[in-house]
Amino acid sequence: MTVATATSAIAIRHATDADICVLADLAILDSRRQLTGPALIAEVDGIARAALDLRDGSVAADPFFPTAELVDLLRVRARRLEDEAPARSLRERAIARVRRPRRALSMRA
């Protein structure tokens, strides 16, 4: 069993087209379907150990390596990316407001 030490180098990066095999390998190890959307990959000492789908939040991880903290790091990074996303246009905000359910108004004084 491999254990990450305090001196392990951890990298979080966007998956590219060249990472299709890496994502497929993680999915096979994790006995799940391959991630299909844009993804983030967590590497430890240059080896991909976990990946997070940015569309649906699903994860594929190496079950033979402790990955819980790596998955947490991936989720934190994904949230940061959402926060850094460019502001929506006026049209997008208006559409979102129309689709949002409205709260009932109270007629009490």
Image (cartoon, helix red, strand yellow):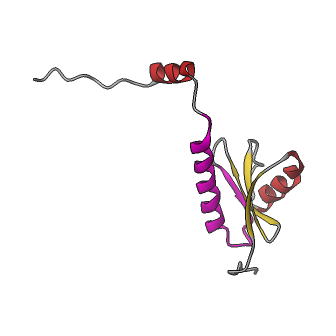
1 lies above or below 74: below
Q: Decide which of 53, 93 is in the foreground and name it.
A: 93
**What residue range appears in magenta?**
58-86
Residue depicted at x 59% and y 50%: 80
The reply, left or right, for residue 108 in relation to residue 21 is left
User: Is residue 101 in the magenta section?
Assistant: no
The answer to whether residue 88 is above or below residue 8 is above
Q: In which quarter of the image is residue 109?
A: top left
Q: Which residue is drawn at 78% across and 49% down?
A: 34
Quadrant in which the N terminus appears: bottom right
Which residue, as the protein is rendered here, is positioned at the far left? Answer: 109
Residue 52: where, in percent of width, then height? 69, 52
Residue drawn at 81 percent across, 53 percent down: 23
Residue 89 in picture, x, y percent from top left: 58, 24
Q: Position of residue 4 (x, y in %)?
A: 71, 78
In the rendered image, residue 68 lying in the magenta stretch gets the answer yes
Place of residue 33 in the rendered image (x, y in percent of width and height, measured from the top left): 76, 49
Above/below status of 67 relative to 98: below
Image position of 24 (left or right of 108): right
Classify residue 76 as left or right of residue 98.
Answer: right
Number of marks drawn: 0
The quarter of the picture where residue 59 lies is bottom right
